[in-house]
Structure formats: structure tokens, C-alpha cells
Image: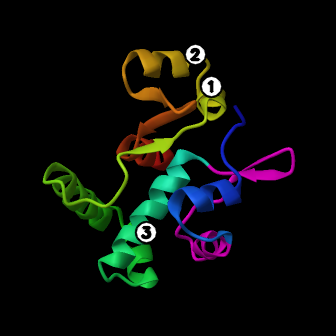
């Protein structure tokens, strides 16, 4: 399995164009990808962030407002609380799982992938390693 996704794969996964993704990066809404062999590689954390941005846009937030929410941790905590409520009551439009690169996990801590699978925090789905979208977002933030 290749480490991470190309911008085209990420765009297909989240239903955006590569141009939109690059625009979000330039506006500071999305962290830069990792560069491997001169190719940009994106993670499940990127997908989770893009899903969050898209969901907030559907709720009427402008990109400038979303940037302020993301940049201010106290406001971001309130946003997470609201998102959790929506997940609990079934009204969330954010996917529950996003793809994760085993190579990225292993680079951070060798052997962690197997531990996370045993703990149920990562799982295989359609030959892709997956994680809960909130876990992927929190991991990316940390």
C-alpha cells in the first residue's frame, strides 16, 4: 500500500477538485502534504479536515469564518462539541471513517499499526486501513 494519497485520490474521496484542495491549502485551511519521492501525499487527517471545511460551508460559514474557527482553539473546542452532538443524534454529514496510511503510522511509532488494529482504533475495509474520522483529525492536530 502506498503511503498516503495523491491529490487526485484525495479529491475523489472528498468530492472536491484538486484546485479546491490547493486553494484551501493556500488559505491555511489545510496543512501541507508530506512529500515522498517528489510527490505530495495526503493522509486521512487531510480528508477529515476537508470534510469539516465542506460541512461548515454547507452550514453557511464562509472560508474566512472557518479559518478563524480552526485557528482559535477555544472556538474550535466548541465546534468539536457541536460536531460530537450531531454525531450522537445522527444529523452529522461527516463520514465516520477515513483512510489511514500504515506507513505514516509506522514512521511515527514502529509497531503502532498492529497495536491500533488490536485495540480496534484502526481496521481494514476494502483493502484500505481505516480510522474513525475524529481520531484521524485529532491525530493530525497533535
Q: Which residue is mark 3?
A: 53
Quarter where residue 67 is shown: bottom left
Any mark on residue 46, and which? none
Name the outermost residue toward the front. 126
Number of other residues with Cα within 10 Å of mark 3, as a class: few under 14, some 14 to 19, many 20 or more? many
**Vertical position of residue 21 compared to residue 89: above or below:** below
Front-lying residue, 137 or 133: 133
Whole-angstrom CA distance, mark 2 to mark 3, is 32 Å
Residue 71 appears in the rendering: no
Q: Secondary structure at mark 3?
A: helix
Q: Position of residue 33 (x, y in %)?
A: 67, 54
Q: Is residue 29 left or right of residue 90?
A: right
Q: Which residue is mark 1?
A: 106
Say whether marks 1 and 3 touch (CB < 8 Å).
no
Quick one: label 1 or label 2, which is nearer the N terminus? 1
Q: Position of residue 105 (x, y in %)?
A: 58, 30
Residue 20 appears in the rendering: yes
Any mark on residue 111, and which? 2
Say whether marks 1 and 2 touch (CB < 8 Å).
yes
Q: How is the image coloured?
A: rainbow
**Vertical position of residue 31 compared to residue 56: above or below:** above
Q: Which residues are magenta?
A: 19-42
Quick one: label 1 or label 3, which is nearer the N terminus? 3
Q: Secondary structure at mark 2?
A: loop
Q: Secondary structure at mark 1?
A: helix
- Of circles 1 and 3, the one toward us is 3
The residue drawn where x is 38% and y is 81% is 65
The residue drawn where x is 51% and y is 49% is 45
The residue drawn where x is 37% and y is 18% is 119
The residue drawn where x is 31% and y is 61% is 93
Q: Quadrant of the N terminus?
A: top right
Amino acid at each position: 500500500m502506498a503511503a498516503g494519497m495523491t491529490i487526485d485520490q484525495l479529491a475523489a474521496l472528498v468530492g472536491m477538485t484538486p484546485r479546491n484542495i490547493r486553494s484551501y491549502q493556500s488559505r491555511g485551511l489545510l496543512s501541507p502534504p508530506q512529500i515522498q519521492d517528489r510527490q505530495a501525499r495526503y493522509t486521512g487527517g487531510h480528508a477529515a479536515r476537508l470534510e469539516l471545511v465542506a460541512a461548515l460551508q454547507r452550514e453557511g460559514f464562509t472560508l474566512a469564518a472557518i479559518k478563524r474557527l480552526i485557528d482559535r482553539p477555544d472556538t474550535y473546542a466548541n465546534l468539536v462539541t457541536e460536531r460530537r452532538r450531531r454525531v450522537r443524534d445522527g444529523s452529522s454529514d461527516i463520514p465516520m471513517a477515513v483512510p489511514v496510511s500504515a506507513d505514516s503510522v509506522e514512521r511515527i511509532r514502529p509497531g503502532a499499526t498492529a497495536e491500533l488494529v488490536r485495540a480496534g482504533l484502526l481496521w481494514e475495509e476494502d483493502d484500505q486501513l481505516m480510522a474513525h474520522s475524529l481520531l484521524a483529525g485529532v491525530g493530525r492536530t497533535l
